[in-house]
Amino acid sequence: LLDQELVVLVEVLQVVERYALLLVREAGLLLRQAPAPAGDAGKRRGQVAPMSDRKKDLLAAARKARSRAYAPYSEFPVGAAVLGANGRIYSGCNVENASLGLTCCAERSAIFAMIAAGEREVREVLVVGDTGEALPPCGACRQVMAEFAPPSAVVHMCDRTGAGRSVTVAELLPHVFRLKKKR
Ligand code: THU
């Protein structure tokens, strides 16, 4: 192929990818908005949907990790849990340092624990602080998530009760930096 043809091909593929992501997102929204069958009182629109068992497991693991956070400088403990493609859950907490910039966030701790255990693919993420509002991951953690999770992977951002918002990795970091891998 000529260089110019390659450029056009890459552009076309990028457009296709963008529409595929949009479709995935719309499908997710439609599913979330689908009315519950009549008589299913707890699931009626406008009410909080019951938490899936998987999210419950992620939340429990993230809370346990949060209880171990090392955050004497900020007193802002955070816990995170990731579901690996192998079905296992890995958790992490924030670990601060007197040299403040060396702090590692809970999300990265959890993902690094997964990598150290031999799993490379994140399927789902949950992050929980001790906050009244849902806790969005910082920019550095979004980039690390994008390294190991597909763009469609769901990230649950929770307040201390476990309620909050769920978005995809692509929504958190739309213009991800990528570098060609040597192998
Ligand atoms: N922190 C996390 O662990 N995850 C986040 O998503 C945001 C911030 C930690 C880093 C630091 O220890 C404390 O919260 C305050 O920034």
Image: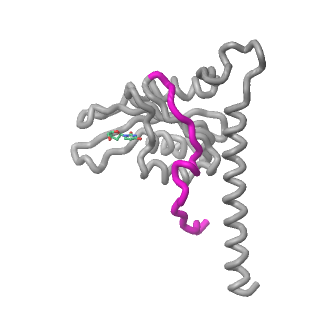
Q: Position of residue 104 (x, y in %)?
A: 37, 44
Determine the residue located farthest toward the front in the rendered image. Answer: 46
Q: Depth check: give the residue in front, 176 or 149.
A: 176
Q: Position of residue 129 (x, y in %)?
A: 40, 31
> For residue 85, which quarter of the picture?
top right
Quick check: which quadrant has ligand 1? top left
> For residue 174, which quarter of the picture?
bottom right
The residue located at (54%, 67%) in the rendering is 179
Q: In the rendered structure, does residue 83 fall within the stretch colored magenta? A: no
Q: Colour mode?
A: one colour
Q: Is residue 120 above or below residue 50?
A: below
The residue located at (70%, 57%) in the rendering is 19
Q: Is residue 167 left or right of residue 128?
A: right
The residue located at (45%, 44%) in the rendering is 108
> For residue 58, which quarter of the picture?
top right
Q: Is residue 182 left or right of residue 105?
A: right
- Quadrant (top left/top right/bottom left/bottom right) for the C terminus: bottom right
The residue located at (41%, 30%) in the rendering is 133
Q: In the rendered structure, does residue 171 fall within the stretch colored magenta? A: yes
Q: Is residue 99 left or right of residue 107?
A: left
Q: Is residue 1 above or below residue 111?
A: below
Q: Is residue 4 above or below residue 82?
A: below
Determine the residue located farthest toward the bottom in the rendered image. Answer: 2
Q: Position of residue 154 (x, y in %)?
A: 60, 40
Q: Depth check: give the residue in front, 57 or 21.
A: 21
Q: Is residue 102 left or right of residue 138?
A: left
Q: Depth check: give the residue in front, 94 or 46.
A: 46
Q: Position of residue 86 (x, y in %)?
A: 66, 38
- Most frequent secondary structure within the magenta stretch: loop
- Quadrant (top left/top right/bottom left/bottom right) for the N terminus: bottom right
- Give the residues in magenta: 161-183
